[in-house]
Amino acid sequence: MRGDSKMINHIRTVFKDKFMVKPNKVYFAPGRVNIIGGHTDYNGGNVLPFCIDKGLFAAVSNTDDLKIRIFSENFNLEGIIAVDLTATKYEKKERYSDYLLGIIKELQVLNLHLDHGLNISLSSNLPVGGGLSSSAALCMLLLEIINDEFDFGLERLERVKLAKKVENDFIGVNCGIMDQFVIGYGKKDKAVFLNAKTLSFEYIDLLLDDYSFILINSQLNRTLKGSKYNDRQKETNEALKILQKTFKLDYLCDLELTDLDKALTLLGDNILRKRVKHVITESDRVVKAKHALNNHDYESLGKLLTEAHYSAKDDYEISAPTLDKMVDLALENKALGAKMIGGGFGGSILVLVSDDEIDDFIENYQKSFVKEFGKKFIYNIVSAGTGVKLID
């Protein structure tokens, strides 16, 4: 709570410095962590994410003209970017304000038009490059602001789907719906067990008893659009088309685990076999992780995290040597389990540690990290927080 108050005061100060007036409202959208379920969402499978207690903050005021002026502390050198609401066409500029352009474009398709301007200032306490889905948080945050300020009445699921459409069609990242969904539906002390095909979901208690999740940042720079993220979707789509000749499948994750061995024999390409193996076993691990949490079985949960990491590394090939070494170091220092999170190729690892061991873990991991990488590690102990919202 104190952290929120500090950030609220900070974003209000930044806003006044930039726009010379006081903001009317402050909004928040969290980052997210996917406990397990890597790359299963766009394949129609299960995921188990939660919102963390850090994210993006926005201070907002209305203006009488037809421009949205937006400033981000993370991109300070870009200054205040002005978006003309009378424009008939919006094209990407390869900067963070593209999310705003994409939203406006999609709202026009829905015949929803912005009839006055806004000033928006953004600030973040998310670790930079941490793989915590800051892009989905930004898109959901801007949609929350616009829906509220213009009284559009878009339901939560409509906003979730709209944010995904912006990411897919305007930004050009073929992500699934997990990030937008959990940022839209997240609850304090809860994970979201979501089936990405049906969008059916349930909340799972995430108080963790005498255990904690630690996020450790790899400090690797990467973007999903510039990585091989989109390639993985192409590969799984290719495998799906082959398997649909034998199995009745709408999505790859419709394949039953009991049919996996047979399915793998139908795929002549070893790359496709590896991709399918990861996706089907990962979706099953999500179900097992849900049961482990419900049963307070943290030993099993830790093992599932580690299995998920090596599946992502060996079969889906979305890890990086730095991430792999970070996971190894965590396991060597008595973590119950560890895995990469996010889309891959960088970001952070998620580590499950007993609270009895946490001080020793942090001290020993620091020594190991400095010895291996020549610098101190960046970490946060995270808990499950709420989704996107108006906070002040």
Image (cartoon, helix red, strand yellow):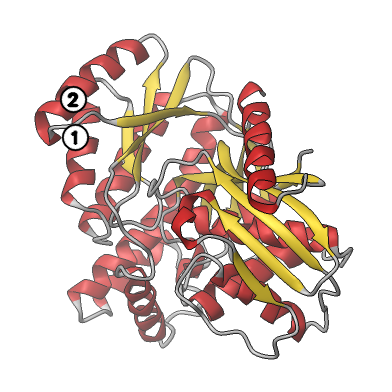
In screen coordinates, is 288 left or right of 235? Answer: right
Q: Is residue 147 visible?
A: yes
Q: Residue furthest top?
A: 356
Label 1 packing within 10 angstroms: few (<14), some (14-19), many (20+): some
Badge 2 vs badge 1, beta-carbon distance below 8 Å = yes
Task: Name the residue at the bottom extreme.
Answer: 88
Residue under label 1, please give it: 328
Point out residue 6 in the picture as x, y percentages from the top left corner.
63, 27
Q: Position of residue 372 (x, y in %)?
A: 11, 33
Residue drawn at (67%, 64%) of the image: 69
Residue 164 found in image quarter: bottom right
Q: Assign a secondary structure to mark 1.
A: helix
Q: Residue at x 44, y 84 (%)?
A: 244
Give how far apart the Cα atoms at labels 2 and 1 are.
6 Å
Give the residue drawn at x 33%, y 32%.
378
Q: Is residue 349 left or right of residue 63?
A: left
Q: Look at mark 2 in the image and give the residue it sits on.
A: 332
Relative depth, front residue between 164 and 315 = 164
Picture quadrant of residue 385: top right
Please provide percent x and percent y for residue 141. Answer: 66, 55
Q: Nearer the viewer, residue 217 or 287?
A: 217
The answer to whether residue 250 is seen in the rendering is no
Q: Amino acid at mark 1?
A: Asp
Amino acid type of the residue tagged 2 in the rendering: Glu
Picture coordinates of residue 110, whole percent (x, y): 79, 82
Q: Could you tell me how many numbered marks the image carries?
A: 2
Q: Is residue 89 above or below residue 371?
A: below
Q: Is residue 101 above or below residue 126?
A: below
The single residue placed furthest to the front in the displayed view is: 20
Please tell me whether residue 312 is drawn above or below residue 98 in the rendered image.
above
